[in-house]
Amino acid sequence: MPDDLPDDPEEVRDLSVRLILLLGAVSLLGSLVSNGARSVTGPYILLLGGGAAVVGLVAGFGEFIGYALRSATGVYVDQSRSYWKVAMAGYGLLVTIPVLAVAGRWESAALLIIAERVGKAIRTPARDTILSHATTSVGRGWGFGIHKALDQIGAVIGPLVMVAALALTGGYAPGFLLLGIPLVGLAMMLLFARSVVPKPGHLEADGGDRETGSDLPGIMPYATFIFLGMAGFANFPLISFHLKAQSIIPDAAIPLFYAAAMVVSVVVALLVGRIFDRVGTHTLLAIPVLSTVTVLLAFSLTPGLALAGSLIWGAGIGIFETVLRASIAESTAANLRGQVYGTVSAVFGTAWFVGSAVMGVLYDVSLGHIVAYVVIIETAAVAAYLWMYRCRIAMRLQEGIGNLIP
């Protein structure tokens, strides 16, 4: 297909939808592979001789580097505009998952696990920038909502594939090898997506070359809001620890709570995408509200309330990345999107790491301390949103005055 896209807006929209669905399918398969492996990497490292401290260090460092490196890869994406090459390089590192089957030592497994997270850091800013162009004609929220929903479906299927492999073979190696099969489909879909739209910037009316006119209300207030909102968002490992430690539900029911939360995240991602296209960045205010409600319910001693809290946690997962990515695409100049996606992702991951660590420590003190921490941090998040909103109004006023001056 030639680089120049059709002039008919309907044809451009159809092409954009195809690209969103293709990248959604790629993310579904990629999430299937990565989450399938991550569901068992802890016991696998233990099997290879690594201790609990090693498991915690590898998991924590892997997640941290998977977010922290995105600011650097985002800058590179903006400068090189090699969106497809960078995305392919990042997805290519998923090959480390089937290689885990032949890792004979925990040190080798640890390096492979961290390498997969590095791949996530490489591909995400490039992929999100491509999506930001594709969502121009279909609605930012709706486009990113579809993509997030497909990604979450893969996150549910992956662990189930590994469970089936363990049940049938009794070993981890066959499961890791089985996860290599979706990689073939992933590579084919990624290549096809590139052939469909080799230059995704052309999906925007200006060809993706707009360098001014961004009304993102400054990266500092926006990043502050994301940091505070995410620092008060509980992680499911802590919720599941609470469910087991307090004997609230049987152990076998805990994965069902998680699966139910993931189903909710799929539905909410689609709904909130539509809502974002109507009300814009105000949708972000749902984040501190859901974070607070989650901690009030999920850490309850009543099974019904704990389930409700888990489902609301799933809703938060569906909202966070959908609204986050859609708001950046809506408000950031095309030549800066990779950098902004990378920077905000790094803030997002760092905040989740810090918040999880703080809440883990506070849990040993009392549940009341966790609730107090979340209420304080999310109140500060609302204040940061007001700061962000005021900056946004000020920038629009400046732009309006500038347009009046001949």
Image (tube, rainbow, N blue to C red):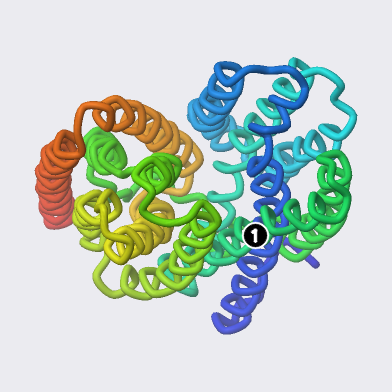
Q: Is residue 405 visible?
A: no
Vertical position of residue 177 compared to residue 281: above or below: above
Front residue of this view, candidates 375 and 51? 51
Residue beneath the point at 75% across and 65% down: 196
Q: Position of residue 389 (x, y in %)?
A: 14, 50
State which quadrant residue 7 falls in: bottom right
| Callout 1 amino acid | Gly
Vertical position of residue 103 compared to residue 349: above or below: above
Say which quadrant the N terminus sits in. Answer: bottom right
Residue beneath the point at 62% across and 79% down: 14
Residue beneath the point at 62% across and 38% down: 120
Q: Secondary structure at mark 1?
A: helix
The answer to whether residue 278 is left or right of residue 324 is: left
* Residue on which the image places disc 1: 154
Looking at the rendered structure, the number of numbered marks drawn on it comes to 1
Vertical position of residue 215 compared to residue 354: above or below: below
Residue beneath the point at 34% across and 72% down: 277
Q: Position of residue 315 (x, y in %)?
A: 37, 62
Front residue of this view, candidates 80 and 70? 70
State which quadrant residue 37 falls in: top right
